[in-house]
Image (cartoon, rainbow, N blue to C red):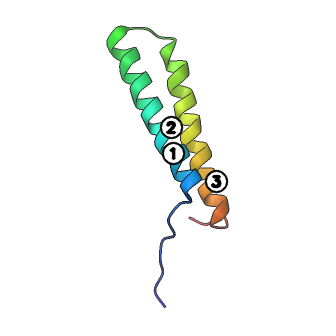
Amino acid sequence: MSARTPSPTIHALALVLVGVVIALTASITALVTGHRPLMVVAAVGFALQVAGWVAHGRRNGGGA
């Protein structure tokens, strides 16, 4: 029996991917335009990524 890395559920994967898109878009836009409050939006994107990975970890019993 070989060890297999389980794939994340669709909801966890969606949270991670949406978080990546929001975080990258907001942080790059904040850097280019100098509009610092956009970093709050980027922080929301990072939080979504964390929530997605936590949901994935719970599904797999918390093991890495």
Residue located 49% across and 39% down the image: 18
Looking at numbered disc 1 in the image, what kind of residue is underneath it?
Val
Q: Is residue 62 something one can see in this rendering?
A: no
Gap in angstroms between the C-alphas marked 2 and 1: 5 Å
Q: Which residue is mark 2?
A: 19
- Residue 56: horizontal and vertical position, in percent? 59, 57
Please indicate whether residue 6 sits to the left or right of residue 61 in the image.
left
| Relative to 26, residue 6 above or below | below
Q: Residue furthest bottom?
A: 1
Q: Which residue is disc 1 drawn over?
A: 16
Q: Is residue 18 visible?
A: yes
Q: Quadrant of the C terminus?
A: bottom right
Q: Are marks 1 and 3 in contact (CB under 8 Å)?
A: no
Q: Amino acid at mark 3?
A: Ala
Vertical position of residue 35 compared to residue 10: above or below: above
SS class, disc 2: helix
Tell me the CA gap for discs 2 and 3.
14 Å
Q: Are marks 2 and 1 in contact (CB under 8 Å)?
A: yes
Question: What is the count of numbered marks?
Answer: 3
At which x and y percent is residue 63? 61, 66
- The image shows residue 34, relative to residue 12, as above or below, that is above
Sequence-earlier tag: 1 or 3: 1
Tell me the amino acid under the disc marked 2: Gly
Residue 2 horizontal side relative to residue 10, left or right: left
Q: CA distance from mark 1 to mark 3?
A: 10 Å
Secondary structure of residue under mark 3: helix
Between discs 2 and 3, the one toward the N terminus: 2
Q: Which residue is mark 3?
A: 55
- Label 2, residues with CA under 10 Å away: few <14, some 14-19, many ≥20: many
x and y, in percent, of residue 41 in the image: 53, 22
